Image (cartoon, rainbow, N blue to C red):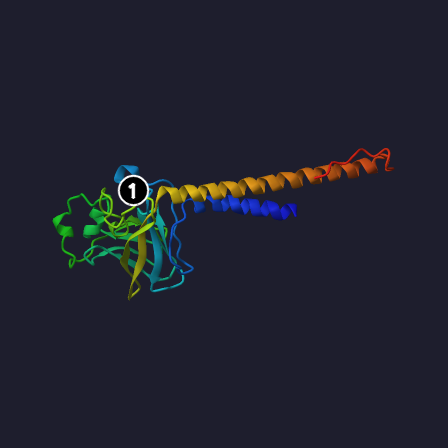
């Protein structure tokens, strides 16, 4: 019983951080997850109230996984498909690709390469990168099989409140989004949703998690004390402590 309770407590502690930042999302593929790593990039405009969720990836192939990082700020693509996975930019141009070998390349003549360096895209795009029909100019940036990038399609592109949000205390879907990709020669997309998430919902989840943790910790303490008393009693009997009803010290009832 004690071991089971310890296991439950450990699992609850491991799940607590994910519950605190839980987001509404439809059922997705087994290889898809939505996560948040750390705090938003405050200097660029990311906001705790925005939550972007991956809801589907096509084509659905083993070894391809996608995650949303920092609430609604960046995407992380991991490619173990054995094929090249290409991400396309805002004009349909090839923006980045992760080769089957794990080599990661970005196209320096893609407008997305420059626009993605600013949260609101407030950058000048070189003339060479304004033509989506031009040949890609690939450069290697990594060899881990993982590509992490900021994408304007998954977040709200203004410091002003979205018109969909009529009540800040209410969970609200802002829009659905897609990011075009290709796995090998097969075209597809990353699909998702952007939500406005009120602070109150995060606070209520935190209270629930804290309450569960307190209850489990209390039960664990009770079982620990009981087992310790039982061991002490057993040790006393083995060492010759009297066992008749008059000499036995009174036992505490729980």
Residue 162 against residue 242 in the figure, above or below = below
Residue 188 pos. (x, y %)? 29, 63
Q: Is residue 45 left or right of residue 211?
A: left
| The furthest residue to the bottom | 186
Q: Is residue 95 left or right of residue 124?
A: right
Residue 161 against residue 145 in the figure, above or below = above
* Observer able to see residue 20: yes
Q: Residue at x 35, y 60 (%)?
A: 56
* Observer able to see residue 108: no
Q: At numbered mark 1, what does the secondary structure look like: helix, strand or loop?
A: loop
Residue 28 against residue 161 in the figure, above or below = below
Residue 30 pos. (x, y %)? 43, 60
Q: Which residue is mark 1?
A: 46
Q: Is residue 212 left or right of residue 247?
A: left
Q: Residue at x 12, y 49 (%)?
A: 127
| The furthest residue to the left | 127
Q: Residue at x 86, y 37 (%)?
A: 245
Q: Nearer the viewer, residue 46 or 184?
A: 46
Q: Residue at x 58, y 47 (%)?
A: 7
Q: Nearer the viewer, residue 49 or 80?
A: 49
Residue 34 pos. (x, y %)? 38, 52
Tell me if mark 1 has few (under 14), some (14-19) or many (20+) residues whose alpha carbon lies within 10 angstroms of its own.
Answer: some
* Numbered-mark total: 1
Residue 238 pos. (x, y %)? 83, 38
| Quarter of the rendering containing residue 66 | bottom left
Q: Nearer the viewer, residue 74 or 5?
A: 5
Q: Nearer the viewer, residue 162 or 99?
A: 162
């Amino acid at each position: 019983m004690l071991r089971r309770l310890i296991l439950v407590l450990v699992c609850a502690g491991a799940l607590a951080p994910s519950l605190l930042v839980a987001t509404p999302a439809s059922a997705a593929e087994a290889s898809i997850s939505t996560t948040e790593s750390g705090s938003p990039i405050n200097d660029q405009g990311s906001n705790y109230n925005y939550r972007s969720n991956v809801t589907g990836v096509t084509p659905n192939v083993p070894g391809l996984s996608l995650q949303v990082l920092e609430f609604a700020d960046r995407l992380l693509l991991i490619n173990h498909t054995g094929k090249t996975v290409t991400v396309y930019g805002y004009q349909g141009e090839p923006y980045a690709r992760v080769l089957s070998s794990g080599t990661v390349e970005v196209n320096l003549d893609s407008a997305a390469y420059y626009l993605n360096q600013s949260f609101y895209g407030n950058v000048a795009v070189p003339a060479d990168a304004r033509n989506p029909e031009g040949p890609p100019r690939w450069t290697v940036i990594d060899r881990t099989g993982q590509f992490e990038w900021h994408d304007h399609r998954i977040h709200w592109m203004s410091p002003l409140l979205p018109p969909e949000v009529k009540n800040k205390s209410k969970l609200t879907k802002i829009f659905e989004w897609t990011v075009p990709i290709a796995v090998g020669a097969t075209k597809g997309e990353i699909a998702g949703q952007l939500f406005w998430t009120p602070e109150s919902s995060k606070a209520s989840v935190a209270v629930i998690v804290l309450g569960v943790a307190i209850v489990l910790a209390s039960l664990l303490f009770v079982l620990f004390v009981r087992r310790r008393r039982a061991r002490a009693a057993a040790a006393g009997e083995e060492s010759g402590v009297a066992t008749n009803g008059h000499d036995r010290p009174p036992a505490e009832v729980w």
